[in-house]
Image (cartoon, grey):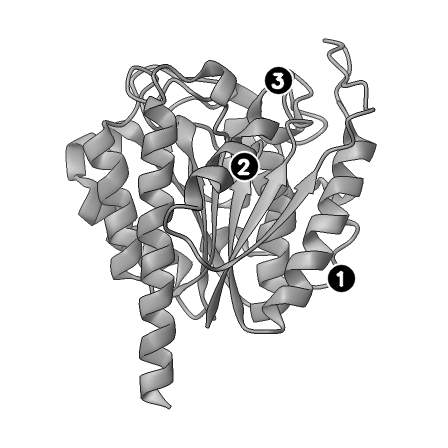
Amino acid sequence: MKTLIVGAESDLGVHIDGAHLGPVQLINDLKGFYKGEVISFSQDENIIKSRNLSDRRKNEFEIDKFNTNLYNAIVEKTKEDYFPILLGGDHSVAVASALASVKKNNEIGIIWIDAHTDYNTFETTITGNIHGLPLAAITGYKCSELRYFHDGPTIQPSKCVVVGARSIDDAEKDNVRYAGVKVFSTEDIKNRGVKAIMDEAFEIAGYKTNGVHISYDLDVIDPEVAPGVSVPELDGLSEDDAMTINEEIMKHMDQVVSFDLVEFNPLRDINRKTEQIAINIIAQITKAVEQKGQKKETNY
């Protein structure tokens, strides 16, 4: 098994600029220790990004075009036994990466580590920012316009777990309850501990599936610790908790089939604090993938 870093350089899903620069910065940082393959996709620099407050479908066409190319590339690479690690970009790019993993592995679960549940639809979104809709699209809850390029199944909501949520729109809460998605809040993590939450998350997402897709949004971390995100939310996780989540992911690496790290915005970072956390997460995951590949070869 080979590691593939995929740069998804897009911030079309959010009205704030800068997340498209995150993958560029992180991939440049990776050169010091990562020797595997890297592919990157950039948003069209000629796009005039919609910021209209009344626009409930901001940049929908452009996002679909970007995600189509991203999805097709990941699908082709996974045929060659690559393990994809996607670096975003705003969280709308995860529609492509998660569904590409579904295409490869068929029945999978998903653990969505995020301050938000990202379970709005075009009918319930308040901002029109499409980075608030991807998990709904991935799990087949309306939003079919965002996954037209995918001809396989979606991820069942019952196999979907959100970890670290603390900012959910009222109508979005109804969507989550109706769909049956399991949500662990930041408060749950503080009360029960990271290990207990992550063990349960893998039990749910991994139950009778062929693997688990991880989508890790850096805004799950408190902005005092990781300010370099587009939409920070107060009262987030500590750096220790954020890294412990990653350590728990690595313990379950036999179940993990693909990984996202998204929403790093260098324009909002302070003293490169968020960047360093992101690099530490990626370094750990790439090493875990290499060990997983070595274990697989040994078993043969």
195 or 271, which is in the foreground?
A: 271
Q: Earlier in the sequence, mark 2 or mark 1?
A: 2
Q: Nearer the viewer, residue 237 or 175?
A: 237
Image quarter (top left, top right, bottom left or bottom right) of the C terminus: bottom left
Badge nearest the viewer, 2 or 3 = 2
Give the foreground label among 3 and 1.
Answer: 3
Element at badge 3? loop
Residue placed under numbered mark 1 in the picture: 151
Q: Residues within 10 Å of mark 2 (few under 14, many from 20)?
A: many
Residue toward you, 183 or 228: 228
Q: In the rendered image of this protein, does residue 277 appear above or below residue 287?
A: above
Q: Which residue is mark 2?
A: 23
In this rendering, does residue 225 appear at all?
Answer: yes
Residue 37 locus on image (x, y percent): 54, 59
Amino acid beneath label 2: Pro
Task: Determine contact: label 2, label 3, CB under 8 Å.
Answer: no
Amino acid identity at mark 3: Asp
- The structure residue drawn at horizontal position 27% and vertical position 44%, both measured from the top left corner, is 245
**For this view, does 204 lie left or right of residue 76?**
left
* Whether residue 106 can be seen here: no
Q: CA distance from mark 2 to mark 3?
A: 14 Å
In the picture of the structure, the residue carrying the numbered disc 3 is 17
Residue drawn at x 78%, y 31% is 44
Q: Residue 235, percent across and down? A: 29, 17
Earlier sequence position, callout 2 versus callout 3:
3
Secondary element at tag 1: loop
Residue 216 in picture, x, y percent from top left: 43, 41
Residue at 27% of width from left, 27% of height from top? 237
The disc, 3 or 1, on the residue closer to the chain's N-terminal end is: 3
Locate residue 29, reporting x and y percent.
43, 38
